[in-house]
Image: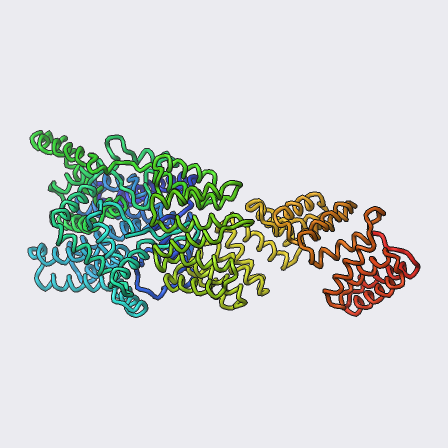
Amino acid sequence: MGSNRPGWLVACLAGVFLLALAVRLTYMWQTAGGPLFHVNQGDARWHDEWARRIASGTLTDGRPFFRAPLYPFFLAGVYRIAGDGPWAARVVQHVLGAASCVLLFLLARRVFSMPVALIASLLTALYGPLMYFENELLMEPLAAFLMLAALLSLTRAADAPTGGRWLMAGLLLGLCCITRPNFLLVVLVVLAWLAFTGRRALSWGSRASGALSLLAGTALPIVPVTLHNVLVGGDFVLIASQGGINFEIGNNPASDGKTAAAPAWLIRHPHHGYLDNVYAASRLVAENDLGRPLKDSQVARYWLGRGLAFWREQPAAAATLLLKKLYFLFNGLEIESNRSLYLDRQWSPLFAALVWVRGLAFPFGLVGPLAVAGLLMGGGDRRLAGLLRVLAAAYALSVVIFFVNGRFRVPLAPLACLFAAHGAHRVALHLARRRWGMLSLRLPALAGLVLLCNTNWFGVRAVDEARQSWVVGSALAELGRMDEAMHRFQEALRREPDNPVTLADLGSLLLRRAKAGDAALAASRFGRAVQVAPDYVPAWLGLGMCHLADPASPDEDAARRCFDTALRLAPDHPPALVYLGEWHLRRNELAKATELLQRAVRSDPRYAAARVTLARAYEAAGRIAQAMRECEEAVRLSPNEAYPHYRLGSLLLDAGDVPAAMAHLREATRLNPNLARAWYVLGNALLARGTPRDQEEALSCFRRAVERQPDLADAHNNLAALLAGRGELDDAIAHLRRALEIAPADPEVGTNLAALLRRQGRRAEAIRVLQDGLSRIPDNADLMLELAWELATASADELRDGARAVELAESVVRKSSAGDARVLDVLAAALAEAGRFEQAAATAQRAAALAAARGQQSLSGQIASRAALYQAGHTYRQ
C-alpha cells in the first residue's frame, strides 16, 4: 500500500529521474574525450546547420520541408537560449531522456503495476542505445519523449474521456508527426482503436466526439507545416517530402533492408562542407529520368512509384525483403545508421558495460525477447495494455515498410522496456507461486526467442571495421588532427583497400597537409579511386586539384580534363561546377568563371561553397557589393562553416568596417582553428584598429597563422614587422628569410629584410638581398630605390657604388611622380656619392620643400640637413 502514498510516488519519480540523469551525464562526460563528440556527421550535421540558420533568424529557405521540421526548431531554441556549443544541446537531450524514464514510470503504473513501473523505468534509465542517441543531434530523443507523453495522454483519455483530454492526446501525436512523419500511421491506428475497440466502453457519440477532438489536436501542429509548404514552398507537401525516397531505399531489388544509400551517386565533397546527398541525389536522378524540372512532391511521388512498382513486379522478393526487415527489427544488434554506436565503447567505460555483443547482443538481445513475451502475456489493464500493444505494432510496421536500423527503433525502446518489465514480472510471479506448468511452456519459448533475436542471419552482425575506422578518421580530419586521421584512413584501407570514398578522403587529407611529396601521394589515391569507381565524382575533382597542387608548375590542362569528366558524369553537379569555375578564376577568365558559379548556385541555392567562390569571382571583377551579398548568404546558409566567415570578414576589412570584420574573423577561427588565413586577416584587422593591446593579439594571430600554414609568406612578413617593433630583430629576420624562401618575387619582403639587416649593420647582406630581388623583378621601383640608398650611403667603401646608385635612382624618378620627396632624397644621396654635389644639393632642397608642403616636417628637416652636407661637398653616410 505504501506504493500508493504521494510521498512514496514522488520519491520513486525523483529517484528514477536522478539515476537516469546521472548515468547519462557520466556517459556524456566520458565520450567528450573522443573525437566523435565534437563533430556532427550525416543527419546530425544537417540538423545542426538547419538549427543554426533558424537561430540566426532564417526560418525558411523558401522550399517545402524535405525533413520533418520540429527537431531543428527545437534545437534552434536550445541554441538561442544556451549557445550552440557541443554541450548544451546534449545536456538538454539527456534531461529529456531522464524525463522519458519518468513518463514511462507513470505509463507503466497506470497500465500495469508499481513493480512493473519500477522495473521498466530502471531498464530505460540504464538502456545504453537511448543514451547514445540522446548524445547525438538527432530527433530520436525528442520523438521518444513526445511518444511517451502522447501514450500517457491517450491512456488518460481512454480511462476518463473528455474532449480536452482527446485534444491534448492529438496535439502530442501531431508533434510526434512533425518530428517523425511515420507517426501518422499511429494516429490512424488510434482512430481505428477508438472506432472499434472502444465500442464496449464508450457510446457512439462519445467516440465520435473523441475522434474529432483527437483529429483537431493532431492537426494543430501539422497545419502550419503544410501551410508553409504550400504558401512558401509553392507545393502541397503534408509535412516533409522525404517519405518517397525513403520508401524506395527500403523497397527495391538492390535493397538490403537496413542501409540508407543515396541513389545513383553520392553527392558530397570533403572541401565544400556538407550537402544532403539523399535530397540532392533523389532530385537529380528523378529529373534526369523524367527529363524535366520537378517539384518536391513530384520527386516524392516518383520514388514512391518506383518502390510500389517493386511490389507489383516482384511481389515474392518484396515480401521476402519485408520479412528480412522484420527480422532486423527484432535482432539484438544495433544496426548502424550514420555511424555505429558501438564506437563509443572505446571512449566510455560506462557505455561499454551497458552495450556489448558477446553472443548475446546486450541490451536489446535480452530486452527484445522479454518484450515479445510481455506482449503475449495477460495482466494489467486489458484495455489500455491492448492499446499500447496495437500502437507498438503500428509504429513497428511504420519502420519496416521503409528500412530498419537501431536508430529508427529508438521510439520503440521505452515500450520494449515496458513490456520486457511486464514479462519479467510475470515470470517472477510464476516462480514465486510455483506455477511450474505455466513456466514449462513459457521459459523454453522465451529461451527460443533469445536465441532467435541473437542469431546472425543475413550477415547482420558483420562488423564493418573499415567503415568504423573511416568514420573516426573523418571526425579527426575535421578537427584538424591530420596525422591521427591519416592513421585511421590507412587502417580503413588495410581492411578495404579499394573503397573509393576512403581513397578520396585520404587524398583530400594529403592535399590539406601539403607536406613534401603529399601531392603525389594524393594523386595516387585519387587515381586508384577513379580506377575502381570511374563514376565517383569527388575522386575526379580531387585528382584535378592534385594537378594544380604545385604552384610552380601546375598542369592546368590535366586538371581541366578531370573537372570536365566530373561534370560529364554529373551534369549540374554543384561541386564540379565550383571546381571548374575556380579553374577559370585561376586563369582570370572571370566571365566564364562567373557563369559556371552562377550555375552552381542555381543548381543548389543552399550550397554555401558555391556562393563563396562566386563572391571571389565578383571581387576579382570589382563587383564588391555582389561579392558581399554572396558571402552574407553563405554565412546564413552555413553559419558553422569557417570559410564563409573568413571571406566575409576579409571583404568587410577591405571596406573599412573593422568591427564587423573582426566579428566574422573571430568566428572563423573559433569554428576552424586551423584556418591559417583567417588568423592572418584577423591579425591585420587588429592592426587596423591599432591599440597597443591589439598589437599583442595581432602578434599571436600571426604566430598561429604560420604555425598552421608555414608557407604563408604574408603572415611571416607581418609577424616580422611586429617582432622588429619589439626589438626582436633576430626572430624578425628569420621570419622574413622564411617569407623570402616562400615568395622570392615579393618585393615588400625583400625590402623589409634589407631594412632590418641595415639596422643590425649588416649592409653587405642587405645589398645582396636587394640585388637578388632585382634579378627576379628587374623593374621594381621599391627594390631599385632601396638598393640605390644602400649603394649611396653604406659606410664601407667597398659597398658603395655612386654611378650604379644614380642609375637606379634616376630610373625610379622617371617612373614615379615628380612630387615624391623620398625618391628625390635617394637621388640626391646618390648624386653626392657620385661627386655631383651641386645637383645633389639642389635635388635635396627640392625634396625638403616637397616634404614640408605635405606636412612631413620631420622628413623635411632630415633632408634639409643632408642638403647642407652636399652644399659643403660632403656625402651622407648611414
Query: Colour scheme used in the picture?
Result: rainbow
Total tally of numbered discs in the picture: 0
Nearer to the camera, 252 or 546:
546
Residue 609 appears at what percent x and percent y? 44, 57
Nearer to the camera, 362 or 798:
798
Q: From the viewer's perspective, is residue 155 above or below residue 287?
A: above
Residue at image position (14%, 52%) is 311
Instruction: Locate residue 705 relative to residue 211 in the image: left or right.
Output: right
Residue at image position (41%, 46%) is 39
Residue 556 appears at what percent x and percent y? 48, 53
Q: Could one spot residue 367 in this view of the protein? A: no
Residue 523: quarter of image:
top left
Q: Could one spot residue 291 in this view of the protein? A: yes
Most extreme residue toward the right is 872
Residue 192 appears at what percent x and percent y? 12, 57
Nearer to the camera, 607 or 475:
607
**Quarter containing the N terminus:** top left
Residue 764 appears at what percent x and percent y? 77, 45
Residue at image position (16%, 38%) is 423
